[in-house]
Every structure is written in C-alpha cells, then in structure tokens.
Image (cartoon, rainbow, N blue to C red):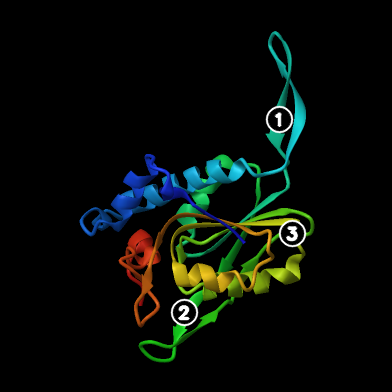
Amino acid sequence: MIVNILDKKKSILNKFISEIRDVNIQKDSMRFRRNIGRIGEIIGYELSQSLSFEKNTITTPLGTKIVDTPKKDIVLCSILRAGLPLHDGLLNYFDDAENAFISAYRKHRNDTEFEIKVEYFASPNLDNKTLILADPMLATGQSIVAVYEGLKKHGTPKEIHLACVIGSIEGIEYIKNYFPENTKLWIATVDDNLNDKGYIVPGLGDAGDLAFGVKL
C-alpha cells in the first residue's frame, strides 16, 4: 500500500484539521461538516494527480484546445453516515463520478469488544473502474476492510484509492494486509494511539455524531 499523509506538508489543510479537533469549534455541526468537506476537496486534488488522464479536444469561442483530463471511470463510495460530508467534498471535484453508498457500524459486545456490521449496499458495477473509498475515521481499520470485502461482489476495480481524514498507525498497518499492494491511501493526518475502546487518541471524537447529532 502506498500511504500519503497530507499534513506532513504545511498548508491550509492544517487549519481545517485543527478546527475539526477543537472541542469548542466542534459545537457548530455545520462548520464541522464544512471542514470535513474542505478536507475532502484537498484530498481530491492530491489524489487527482495520480489518476489516469486522456487528451480531449475542447472547442472555445475562438478555436480549439487539447486538454488532459481524468478518465471518466471513477466510482466514489462512502461509508454511512459519517462519510457523507467527506463524500460531498470529493464530489465537488469528481462531479461526474458514479456513486456508491455502504453502511457500516460497530455492534458492541461490551465496552471494549465489537464487530463490524455491514447491512446496506448501493453500488454500480466496479469492474475495471477507479474506486475511491471514503471514510473519515480510520481507527482500527476493521470498518473499511469489511466494506471492501462487501464491495467485491460488485466487481474488481482496476485501482483503489482510500480517502480518510484521520487515522491511527495501528489502523493503517491493519488494512495493509487486506487491500491490493498498489492501493493508495490518502489521509489528512495520523495519530499514534488507540484507546481500549478502539478510538483514535487524541483524535477528534465521533465524526458521525459531530456532523449529524448523537445517535441512540
């Protein structure tokens, strides 16, 4: 797996990361969603530089121009519900992509043990396409692996990009065992630790709750 950690290079991205972490700014759920979307746009730009391009002849009012543009073979897949603001940010850049939506959640056995339940799939055929799999939180890595296993019945992509906002070192090492070697991970920032409940520390909390409200 090729791992790209975007905050290693100082940019405006750092401002958006600092705000989604900040307990005071987090109280504004609309701003939290917007910042996740902004991060998605930055990930989309960085990711776009590694896509396959083709030449297209564009007609202007005064002539024609040959322009290199990305091939229209992208499927953008997000994990519900936390992935929706990230999906919107990526979709701002890949606005002609096909879309897929998958549900995944932790079903707890107790305070520290859980299994990942994947129950909803809506996906086009993935054969020979470019799959961008978006999930803001890469904690243990179990959710994104479970979703990938579920997606396999929809076809085999020619390439896979993982778009994440924040992750743990442990989660990144875990997913390396399940995705093809040429998979590219694009992640805004990485923290060192997980707590005994499998949450990223210092992290930012629960992205789904911060974006959409606390669930039952």
From the image, tell me which residue sits under label 1: 68
Residue drawn at the location 64% of the way across and 44% of the way down: 50
Q: Quadrant of residue 175?
A: bottom right
- Pointer 1 local density, CA inside 10 Å: few below 14, some 14–19, many at least 20: few
Q: Quick check: 101 left or right of 88?
A: right
Under mark 3, the amino acid is Pro
On the question of residue 147 being in view, the answer is: yes
From the top left corner, tell me how far across and down residue 14 is, in percent. 35, 46
Under mark 2, the amino acid is Arg
From the top left corner, tell me how far across and down residue 35 is, in percent. 37, 48
From the image, tell me which residue sits under label 3: 157
Under mark 1, the amino acid is Asp
Q: Quick check: 156 left or right of 9?
A: right
Residue drawn at the location 64% of the way across and 72% of the way down: 178
Residue drawn at the location 79% of the way across and 55% of the way down: 128
From the top left corner, tell me how far across and down residue 149 is, in percent. 66, 74
Residue 93's place in the image compared with 130, above or below, is above
Q: Quick check: 165 left or right of 125?
A: left
From the image, tell me which residue sits under label 2: 106
What kind of element bears circle 1?
strand
